[in-house]
Image (tube, coloured by chain):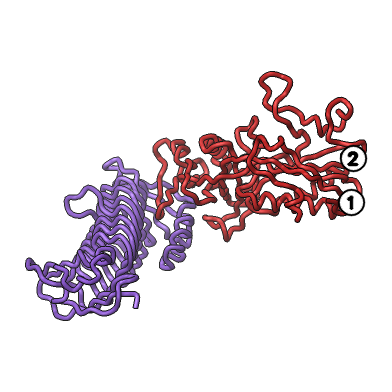
Chain colours: A purple, B red
Amino acid sequence: MSYLILRLKKKLIFRLDLGEIVPDKLKNKKKNVKNLKIFYGNEEKKLSDFFSFQGKLNKGIIFKGNLGKCDYIGNSMKEGEIIVNGSVGEYLGNKMENGKILVKGSAGNYAACSLKGGEILIEKNAGDYLGSSIQGDKIGMSGGRVIVQGNVGNRLAFKMRAGIIFVKGNAKNYLGSQMIAGTIVINGKIGSNPGILMKRGTIILKKKVSLPLYFKYSGKNNYLFLKIFQFYLEKLNSEFKNIFPDTYTVKFVGDTSCGGKGEELILN
Amino acid sequence: MIINGIKIEKTFAEAFPMKATRIIVTAETKYWVSKAVESMTGFATSVIACGCECGIEKEIKESSTPDGRPGAAVLLFAMDSKGLAKQVLKRIGQCVLTTPTTACFSGLESNEKISLGQSLRYFGDGFQISKKIEHKRFWRIPVMDGEFVIEEKTSVTPAIGGGNILILGSSRGHVLKAGQIAVKEMSKVENIILPFPGGLVRSGSKIGSKYKGLIASTNDAYCPTLQGATKTNLNNEIEAVLEIVIDGINEEDIAKAMKKGIITICKNSNKGIKVISAGNYGGKLGKYHFHLREIMK
């Protein structure tokens, strides 16, 4: 078996920090995995107190059970795969550098926070601050790809610096606020104030919206880079297939209130 | 060795190391692709005075280009990476950026990189936008017909310049016809270009000159009008010689192109063509030696 399967044995009352349980860190601790120390609330416990073990760690880790209170899954991960058969808590893929995470449920707040590389696929919804900076940090997500098949919360991509976020559902208020660079694609509806105080970067929307006042109309044109983007992304993950059916779009620039040169492209 | 009445001389083509890159140019239509690459590959026959040697390697179908539009691959060769980078910047900047609807991409992957759009982006005067996918960065430079998209860097690979064959015949007409047929077939080989106009060169050169400061001069040993006046490699039957020069990114494909050219000539031009030879400098100039008879085995 290629995956180490960790099955949650009990219902959690407090939050469980799984930041150390990533493939690259476990690789060198194969024999001592069960005794690894983790924090449950403010108490230090053993990993085996919460999980049963099965299989071998070759390709990666599979988590089973209701992990809604498990935070920092995939924290600073550098290689390998994590598959979660259910929902996860906060800070999923925090500072992750490479590898893949697949969540077959929803993710809490701060997923893909300060993500540097790799890929995160969330099959249901994600909370607030997806792909954002950790509170107090200057930059948010600075590379990699995030795909959310459901909806996302507020402040998506706050201070995002690079990479791509693709949301197939809706996004709430303040998406891309204070964005520095990078690309966000939203298939569904969005809330208020998209791209407010953004410096650079691209927000691609597929539904008509009312933009903040400080975004200026910049004409219609054929944006070839969308096609190039699509072809490259399709090779990385089939989820991106035909992400931009048309490259002829309306463009708005802003946020001009802060001298921003960001762009919002409205495909519809 | 004689094939179909044509003597294949026991000699070799002498080639030397170069650096090369492949650039993919795309545009809205094939017409604009060809305009861009024709312009880009102009005045690039020889490093002696052009700074680089370049040519159109092949057409690329829409399904195989990075943006799904018609394209062409251009190979550029120079003596070193620095020289190559200079030529890439000039040629893309003046010939591809200027052509309506074009975009430009790297067509090679290696560890050694030179700038493609990295310097050209400044044409955007601060309005340029970068987009990064994985490890590739693209620049979107605003131009009057929309945006010019160009990859930030292109890869450089060690390459070989100066593979060649000489076609010796009883008349200029015969040699020209044989040369044209050979060029058509040789151009089908990938990873090579024939940098001279129409793939043929009539002014084959030797190293040096009696005139001070001239690094190359006419290859008098193969000039039919100099028989008797200089040490010649021709006999009385020969009235014209043309050369096909081949630059490539590996030895195998240069040899393959040479073989294809010789076979084509021997098959189609047995009447007027007397000898197939190759140009060399006694092995002193280049480390790559393409022995005709070994190639034809």
Figure check: B32 above or below A41: above
Vertical order, B45 against A15 (above or below): above
Q: Which residue is mark 2?
A: B171
| Separation (CA) of disc 1 from disc 2 | 16 Å
Where is residue B270? Give x, y as percent. 89, 51
Q: Is residue B143 left or right of residue A46?
A: right
In the image, what residue occupies the spot 31% across and 75% down? A3
Mark 1 vs mark 2, foreground winner is: 1
Check disc 2 and report its element: helix, strand or loop: loop
Q: Is residue B49 left or right of residue B110?
A: right
Which corner quadrant of the image does residue A123 belong to? bottom left
Residue A146 at least partly seen: no
Q: Which dot marks residue B156?
A: none
**At label 1, which amino acid type do we have?**
Gly
Instruction: Identify the residue under disc 1.
Output: B5
Circle 2: residue type: Ser
